[in-house]
Image: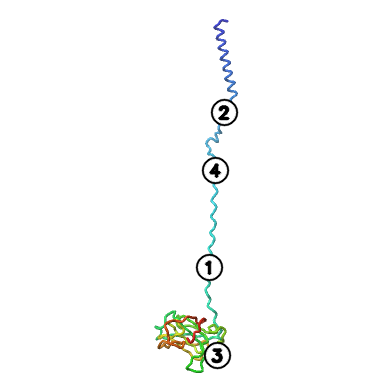
Amino acid sequence: MTTQSRAWALLLTLLVGAQACSKAGDAGKPGGLPPLDPTQAGSAPPAAPPAASPAPPPSARPVPTFELANPEPPPKPDPATSIAGRILLPTTNRGSVGRGDTIYLVARRVSDNPQVPGSLVAVQKIAADAFPLEFAISGRDTMVPGAPFAGEMTLTARVDKDGDPMTRRKGDVLGVVKKVQVGNQDVTINLDTVQPQDESLGGGPATANPHEGNPHGGKPLGHP
């Protein structure tokens, strides 16, 4: 073999060996990623779980309501131990009485002496309203709690402009019914008398300063 032939043989041997090494190296490499499933290639990512709906706010606690009970009028007194009826205001005196004026209803013992008023038994304070004005006076209104309310009485109803039961002022209107038996339920008192001048029921001249007190307690009323 000539020198040129040996050179070509050596070159051919080197080429064959290099190709074999290249194949061996490719065989040892890890395989690439598997191809994507064509059915999943266009699918969207899995949806996130739905957010939990907010809890409803706690129901508002009901606001308590307080209803004031209508005050019931006191029961009517026993007819056998009371005097009841109506107070009338004649047309001629209507200009002397205003709505809400104080009316003192007074019950006294019948006096043996017509010139002297009988002893005071009971007093009731009434607000002037629509006339005729109903009334009922009984042992509930006595000056001394538990005192008997029986026998014959003299009733006086007087519109008191100054609110002082110890005075009568000029222009006050009043009415009197004498000798009324306790148990009578049909008494009529006419406010048909006009007080002609100021008068003190306490035994002295009338003053402009009203006394304190309540017809159901406190200071004695004297002679309303």
| Circle 2 residue | 32
Calculate the distance from the C-alpha at mark 3 to the C-alpha at mark 2. 129 Å
Marked residue nearer the N-terminal end (3 or 2) = 2
| Circle 3 residue | 151
Depth check: 203 or 151 in front? 203
Is 65 on the left-hand or right-hand side of 168? right
Residue 84 horizontal/vertical position (percent):
51, 85
Residue 145 horizontal/vertical position (percent):
56, 83
How packed mark 3 is, by other alpha carbons closer than 10 Å (few <14, some 14-19, many 20 or more), is few
Depth check: 32 or 91 in front? 91
Is 62 on the left-hand or right-hand side of 196? right
Position above or below: 59 against 87: above
Figure quadrant of the N terminus: top right
Q: Secondary structure at mark 3?
A: loop
Residue 130 horizontal/vertical position (percent):
45, 81
How packed mark 2 is, by other alpha carbons closer than 10 Å (few <14, some 14-19, many 20 or more), is few
Residue type at mark 2: give it.
Answer: Gly
Calculate the distance from the C-alpha at mark 4 to the C-alpha at mark 1. 53 Å
Residues at badges 2 and 1 in contact (C-beta under 8 Å)?
A: no
